Amino acid sequence: MRTRRLFGLDRSGPAPAQTRRGQPLRPLTIPNLVGYARLAGIPVFLYLALRSGDGRTAPAVILYLAIAAGDYLDVTVKDGSLVMSPKTLVDKPIEPAKQE
């Protein structure tokens, strides 16, 4: 398999089997569970941060760092293959794929 195909830049091949009609949905995968936990942590973070007088409580900071770490992992690693790193976003803009 070519590198362009692995990174999603070449979509000329057939659709993956998991995306074809009739295939079962799998909402309880590990990446989805990490996303669900991050979403569930947002109201908890807001409660912890707003409950304190100045918004600086250790549990709120720890929860915020856990949510941010999950977000970093979601951007960096997707389905076991490297998609993009935050360094790529800072150093240079991502150019759109050229149509062949």
Image (tube, rainbow, N blue to C red):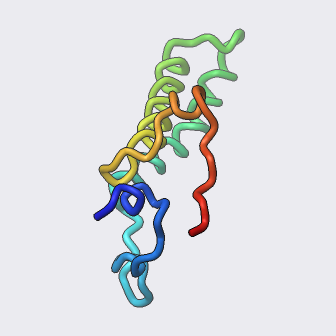
- The residue drawn where x is 50% and y is 41% is 38
- The residue drawn where x is 48% and y is 41% is 75
Q: Quadrant of the C terminus?
A: bottom right
Residue 89 % position (x, y): 58, 34
Q: Is residue 61 left or right of residue 4?
A: right
Q: Is residue 96 left or right of residue 37?
A: right
Residue 93 % position (x, y): 63, 37
Q: Which of the 4 image quarters holds residue 32?
A: bottom left
> So how many labels did they put on this image?
0
**Which residue, as the protein is rendered here, is positioned at the far bottom?**
22
Q: Which of the 4 image quarters holds residue 37?
A: top left
- The residue drawn where x is 60% and y is 60% is 98
Q: Which of the 4 image quarters holds residue 91?
A: top right
Residue 4 % position (x, y): 41, 58
- The residue drawn where x is 46% and y is 65% is 10
Up-down relation of residue 5 to residue 38 (above or below): below
Q: Quadrant of the N terminus?
A: bottom left
Residue 28 % position (x, y): 36, 62
